[in-house]
Image (tube, coloured by chain):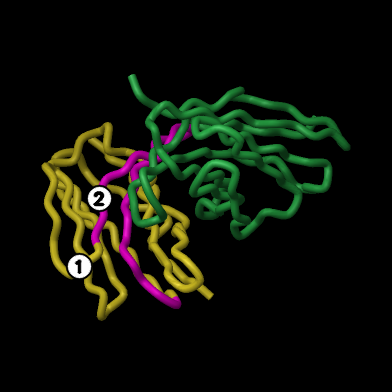
Chain colours: A green, B yellow
């Protein structure tokens, strides 16, 4: 079955620590996205990638980094510079640009220890 | 800036019809999505409108008026499993397309 897989489902970060969230898709989609979801707020775009080896900052990129070395994979690193990392993180992919429907993973819930 | 407004919460009865509204004020427009999201789960695609009018898909329909900056999602024959958050998202143009989400409408379906 084609889909998009995020891991882990739950993640805990210590102060000053970087953590990496995994996102893998086997839908053969060119574009991949990372969103952050906080209670009472809409999904906010962190980073996106329209093609391998290229990515762009979204609206709230500070404190985050990504890589896109393979079409299937788009990992997100939450760095120690992100002072309020507690949130639900969603990865998505689509066949083309933002005007195409996005398929979402089941999310990673990140909390601070 | 971009502004997308949806009601925060709605309650409806099983078997009834409910309309969830979304109004937007954006610097450019290239389509509007509706997604459904159950608590703690992934959003799933429901509909996409880019031209004015009504798109029907089973129990769900979505309407768009570009001149009014307005869309609604209509759910018929409500079922308990329709209890979820419904996200309105606008494709905003200008410097390349981006997708901007509203805060979502939490729908509760009661017996």
Mark 2 or 1: in front is 1
Q: Quadrant of the C terminus of chain A?
A: top right
| Residue lying furthest right | A16
| Residue B13 among those drawn in magenta | no
Q: Quadrant of the N terminus of chain A?
A: top left
Left or right: B31 in relation to A9: left
Most foreground residue, A112 or B17: A112
The chain to which mark 2 is attached is B
Q: Which residue is mark 2?
A: B47
Above or below, A93 relative to A27? below
Left or right: A21 in relation to A6: right
Left or right: B75 in relation to A20: left
The chain to which mark 1 is attached is B
Q: Which residue is mark 1?
A: B51
| Residue B42 among those drawn in magenta | yes
> Residue B72: image x %, image y %?
25, 61
Most foreground residue, B43 or A38: B43
> Residue B103: image x %, image y %?
47, 56
Above or below, B91 relative to A100? below
Residue at image point 47% right, 40% down: A92
| Residue lying furthest bottom | B67
Instruction: Name the disc covering residue B71, or none.
Output: none
Quadrant of residue B65 within the rendered picture: bottom left
Residue at image point 68% right, 26% down: A11
Residue at image point 47% right, 71% down: B3
The segment highlighted magenta reads B27-49
At mark 1, the secondary structure is: loop
Q: Are marks 2 and 1 on the same chain?
A: yes
Give the Cα distance between marks 2 and 1.
12 Å
């Amino acid at each position: 079955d084609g889909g998009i897989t995020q891991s882990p489902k739950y993640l805990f970060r210590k102060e000053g620590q970087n953590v990496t969230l995994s996102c893998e898709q086997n839908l053969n989609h060119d574009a991949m996205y990372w969103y952050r979801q906080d209670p009472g707020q809409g999904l906010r775009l962190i980073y996106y990638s329209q093609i391998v080896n290229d990515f762009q900052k979204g609206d709230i990129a500070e404190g985050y980094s990504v890589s896109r070395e393979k079409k299937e994979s788009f990992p997100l690193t939450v760095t120690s510079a992100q002072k309020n990392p507690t949130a639900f993180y969603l990865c998505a992919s689509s066949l083309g640009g933002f005007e195409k429907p996005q398929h979402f993973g089941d999310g990673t819930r990140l909390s601070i220890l | 800036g971009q502004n997308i407004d949806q009601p925060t919460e709605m309650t409806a009865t099983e078997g009834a019809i409910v309309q969830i509204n979304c109004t937007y004020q954006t610097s450019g427009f290239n389509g509007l999505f509706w997604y459904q999201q159950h608590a703690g789960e992934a959003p799933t695609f429901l509909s996409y409108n880019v031209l004015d009018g009504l798109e029907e898909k089973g129990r769900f329909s979505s309407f768009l008026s570009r001149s009014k900056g307005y869309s609604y999602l209509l759910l018929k024959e409500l079922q308990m499993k329709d209890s979820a958050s419904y996200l309105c998202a606008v494709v905003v143009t200008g410097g390349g397309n981006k997708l901007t989400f509203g805060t979502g409408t939490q729908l509760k379906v009661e017996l």
